[in-house]
Image: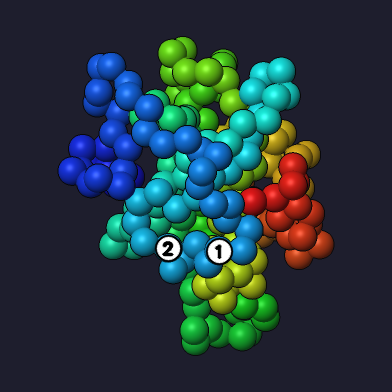
Amino acid sequence: MIKSISSVQNTYYLRQTATQPVAFKSSTQIKRLAQEHIGNCQDGLIGTVKVRLANNEEKFLNLFKRTGTEIEEYKICDDFDRTIGEVQLKIKKFINYDKLEYPTDPSHVFVDNLRNYSKPQTPYHNKDLTYYKDIGTRFLQIALKRSQESGCNGNIKLIAKNESMPFYKNVIHMQEAYPKNSPLRFFNNPNTLYLPEEFKNELSNIRGGL
């Protein structure tokens, strides 16, 4: 992860270090991302995402971007400085690849360290946060959009934790890259998942999309 992300003196980036949170800017004043080229957005506050409270009431939260040497990190924050969730994206674009080994373009965006700190009964839960739904879905939609923008054909991959597997498989409809009958399973992480072509459009439209 980008270890210094919360300590960088960046007037565009919210910091979690304040003991008395001060409202930053109303999310309702910030643009949505559906028509934006996220990859061209400068680091800092780039828009809002629509999520839900526990009672299904809709809420807009702020989305921040920070670009590292090899990754892009996105954070969803509330209006009081607090990080609700974060994710890292690694763009893996293959220009020249062996078509015998890879009959289709292996380019993809790898999703890593996806967290929803507001979700109870998870290893990273912050009990001081209000619970928000759809955080993971929005991050995956961002990954899908970045994959399309980067010429990776909308391909996304990740390595799921066992407790997250039902969400990725049943809600997002990701599939195992190395199923039990695959000879490659022994040499790779069996929890590696990918998004099939037929479910890319469905993912982009879940809960109204970005």
The residue at the far front in this view is 29
Residue 53 in sight:
yes
Q: Nearer the viewer, residue 7 or 95?
A: 7
Q: Nearer the viewer, residue 2 or 166?
A: 2
Q: Are marks 2 and 1 in contact (CB under 8 Å)?
A: yes
Picture colour scheme: rainbow
Q: Amino acid at mark 2?
A: Cys
Examine the image and state in which quarter residue 106 appears.
Answer: bottom right
Query: Does 195 sit above or below residue 123?
Result: below
Q: Nearer the viewer, residue 80 or 98?
A: 80
| Image position, residue 176 (x, y; %) | 69, 51
Task: Say which residue label 2 marks.
Answer: 41
Task: Say which residue label 1 marks.
Answer: 36
Q: Residue sitting at 48 percent across and 26 percent down? A: 117
Q: Residues within 10 Å of mark 2 (few under 14, many from 20)?
A: some
Examine the image and state in which quarter residue 183 appears.
Answer: bottom right
N-terminal of the two: label 2 or label 1?
1
Q: Nearer the viewer, residue 190 or 18?
A: 18
Q: CA distance from mark 2 to mark 1?
A: 8 Å
Q: Residue sitting at 61 percent across and 85 percent down? A: 99
